[in-house]
């Protein structure tokens, strides 16, 4: 018994020790132990038990959000960037019409133009409109008018000497539709589009427009000139009409009257 106790106490680590079956087991030294581990890992790499053995030295991986795990997308190397196709250039910005006198080449007329604007108290657009109205509608005046309640207002460029048609067709006779005809380009509705309603009948070519509130027809689209407007002279504001000439038109026999009349069908043309 004394000898067995001393054997247990003095047993070194690198010497024999008892295994589970009682057979002596030799504990290898540190270098040979590492070689044994390497050979074991190579030989038993296909073993599920060996692959599942946790490492004592490695700690648990810190959990990162998914966005951080993926990381920002790295740009390709310079060599690969040179091979990438270059994006096409943006389309050119369309030129916008000039809206300031400073951008126009007025030459020697610049000072005269600016003086005219100041004297007339006009913006650049207002001065240009006045110039266009004066020469584009040379010999014409700007009439304004509307319905009785004021919901519908318009302006029209026409002669100061008006040529009026007095039609005797079934509807014109009942509503006393005396009118003069202008091209559509010379007419401008200033307000009241939502207040206008339309009546048509028969061929539905004539558009009898009138105010929904007061019932007054201040203008309409005549059958004789669907590309223009028939303006009621009695709905114009005072001060722009110099004279009126009235011509009777036999609208009760409309087709024959249109064939015999030489100028009425061209009154809506520029």
Image (spheres, rainbow, N blue to C red):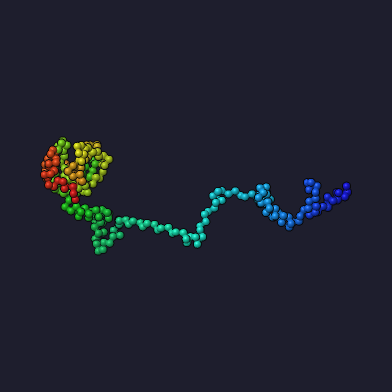
For this orientation, the residue located farthest to the right is: 2
Residue sitting farthest toward the bottom: 108
Query: Residue at point 24% right, 45% down?
Result: 189
State the residue in front, 247 or 189. Answer: 247
**In this orientation, which residue lies closer to the viewer: 178 or 131?**
178
The front one of 157 and 45 is 45
Residue 167 in sight here:
no
Residue 107 in the image, given as x and y percentages of width and height: 26, 63
Q: Residue at x 68, y 51 (%)?
A: 44
Give the number of callouts: 0
Residue 248, quarter of picture:
top left
Q: Is residue 41 left or right of residue 12?
A: left
Tell me where residue 124 sits by quadrant.
Answer: bottom left
From what the image shows, is residue 108 above or below residue 153?
below
Residue 17 at x, y = what percent? 80, 50
Is 167 situated left or right of 39 in this image? left
Left or right position of 36 against 255: right
Q: Is residue 102 above or below residue 170?
A: below
Residue 75: tell me if it is visible: yes
The spot of residue 12 in percent (x, y) is: 81, 54
The residue at the point 64 percent across, 49 percent down is: 60
Q: Position of residue 206 (x, y in %)?
A: 20, 40
- Residue at 22%, 54% in the rendered image: 132
Q: Is residue 112 left or right of residue 45?
A: left
């Amino acid at each position: 018994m004394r000898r067995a106790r001393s054997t247990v106490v003095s047993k070194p680590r690198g010497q024999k020790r008892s295994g589970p079956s009682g057979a002596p087991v030799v504990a290898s030294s540190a270098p040979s132990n590492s070689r044994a581990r390497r050979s074991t890992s190579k030989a038993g790499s296909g073993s599920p038990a060996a692959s599942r053995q946790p490492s004592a030295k490695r700690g648990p991986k810190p959990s990162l959000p998914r966005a951080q795990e993926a990381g920002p997308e790295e740009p390709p190397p310079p060599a690969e960037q040179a091979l990438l196709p270059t994006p096409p250039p943006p389309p050119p910005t369309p030129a916008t019409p000039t809206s300031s006198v400073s951008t126009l080449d007025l030459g020697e007329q610049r000072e005269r133009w600016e003086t005219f604007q100041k004297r007339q108290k006009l913006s650049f657009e207002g001065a240009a409109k006045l110039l266009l109205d004066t020469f584009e509608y040379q010999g014409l005046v700007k009439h304004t008018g509307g319905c009785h309640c004021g919901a519908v207002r318009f302006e029209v460029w026409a002669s100061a000497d008006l040529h009026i048609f007095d039609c005797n067709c079934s509807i014109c006779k009942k509503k006393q539709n005396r009118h003069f005809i202008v091209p559509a380009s010379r007419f401008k509705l200033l307000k009241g589009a939502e207040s206008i309603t339309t009546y048509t009948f028969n061929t539905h070519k004539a558009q009898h427009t009138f105010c929904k509130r007061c019932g007054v027809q201040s203008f309409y689209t005549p059958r004789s000139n669907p590309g223009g407007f028939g303006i009621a002279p009695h709905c114009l504001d005072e001060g722009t009409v110099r004279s009126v000439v009235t011509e009777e038109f036999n609208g009760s026999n409309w087709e024959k009257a249109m064939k015999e009349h030489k100028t009425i069908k061209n009154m809506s043309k520029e």
